[in-house]
Image (cartoon, rainbow, N blue to C red):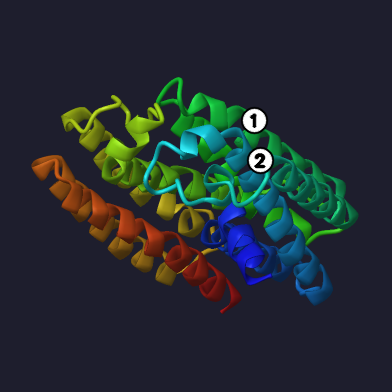
Amino acid sequence: MKDFIDDFKKLVKLRLTLTVVFSASIAFLIGSRVQGDINWINWAILTVSGFLVTGSANGFNEILERDLDKLMTRTADRPLPSGRMKTGQALILSLFMGLFGTILLFKLNILTGALSAFSIVLYAFIYTPVKRMSPIAVFVGAIPGALPPLIGYFAAFDQPVISWIPIILFTIQFVWQFPHFWAIAWVLDEDYKKAGFRLLPTTKRDKISAFMVLFSTLLLIPVGLLPTFMGFGGYIVAVVSIVATLLFIWYSWQLFIKLDIASARKVMFTSFFYLPLIQLTLLFDFIS
């Protein structure tokens, strides 16, 4: 049983899945504050179903890339390429998680369920094959990657209404993904090339790719100030966003100057802390 649990965690990419669930949960709490009440049962449904939907998308991704994962050092020990789990087993698990998770989200409301189904299709069946075709895959993958705040926010309402708040939450997470994934792609470029993945802007560790990382972090300044400009985030959000983004920019500038893996790794680790910091600050500033 322990071996199965370990393999299941790798199949669903546990840390990534928990990050997605966290993002959706924060957006749910923000949406709940907008309407003045938190339905903790619906929050629990969102958390469980969000885990299942994200785990399903990651499972389908690993099924489609099982032969490619064998070629890369960082993925060779995953359950499918290592042979510890059969493709049929992974398919059944992914189908079950996707169907059950989506049904639960449809029970919250139609829009939330539809967005979850769309995210699975876009991530697993469009983004996954495009990774070997063109660097545009990062743009494609950033769309489902930014949907969790939308799903979480709309899950807080019986009848969701489009407003600036979920759009801004989506935009922050969308833009953040570019320096995040390009930094990862820079660090893992040699490993990715073994599988034919083309994720850096020019497919190379060059000045243009480094500039795109820097440019995308610069975009986070106006994007991070949108909550304050639009009136649902206070000055605390603005200050934290500016300070965090300046640190992000500094490490990106170092990458642009040095073009080395060490600098890219600093950009990558900064990105891990940046998004949850901004989301939590926005939540607590919004509550106050």
The residue identified by callout 2 is 60
Q: Is residue 126 above or below residue 22?
A: above
Side (left or right) of 53 relative to 142: right
- Amino acid on which disc 1 is placed: Phe
- Amino acid on which disc 2 is placed: Phe
Residue 188's x, y, as percent? Answer: 31, 43
| Residue positioned most to the bottom | 288
| Residue positioned most to the right | 107
Residue that appears at 55% across and 26% down:
129
Residue 224: quadrant of the picture = bottom left
The residue identified by callout 1 is 125
Residue 216: quadrant of the picture = top left
| Local SS, label 1 | helix
Disc 1: CA contacts within 10 A as few (<14), some (14-19) or many (>=20): some
Q: In this view, does 140 lie above or below 146?
A: above
Residue 101's x, y, as percent? Answer: 80, 54
Residue 5: quadrant of the picture = bottom right
Tell me if label 1 and label 2 are in contact, CB under 8 Å.
yes
Q: Does residue 189 appear anywhere in the picture? A: yes
Find the distance from the CA under tag 1 to the CA under tag 2: 8 Å
| Local SS, label 2 | helix
Residue 69's x, y, as percent? Answer: 48, 39
Question: In the depicted view, which residue is nearer to us: 26 or 125?
Answer: 125
Q: In this view, does 265 lie above or below 61?
A: below
Disc 2: CA contacts within 10 A as few (<14), some (14-19) or many (>=20): many
Side (left or right) of 122 relative to 49: left
Q: In which quarter of the image is the N terminus?
A: bottom right
Residue that appears at 42% across and 21% down:
134
Residue 42's x, y, as percent? Answer: 81, 68
Q: Does residue 159 appear anywhere in the picture? A: no
Residue that appears at 31% across and 45% down:
183
| Among the two numbered marks 1 and 2 on one chain, the one whose residue lies closer to the N terminus | 2
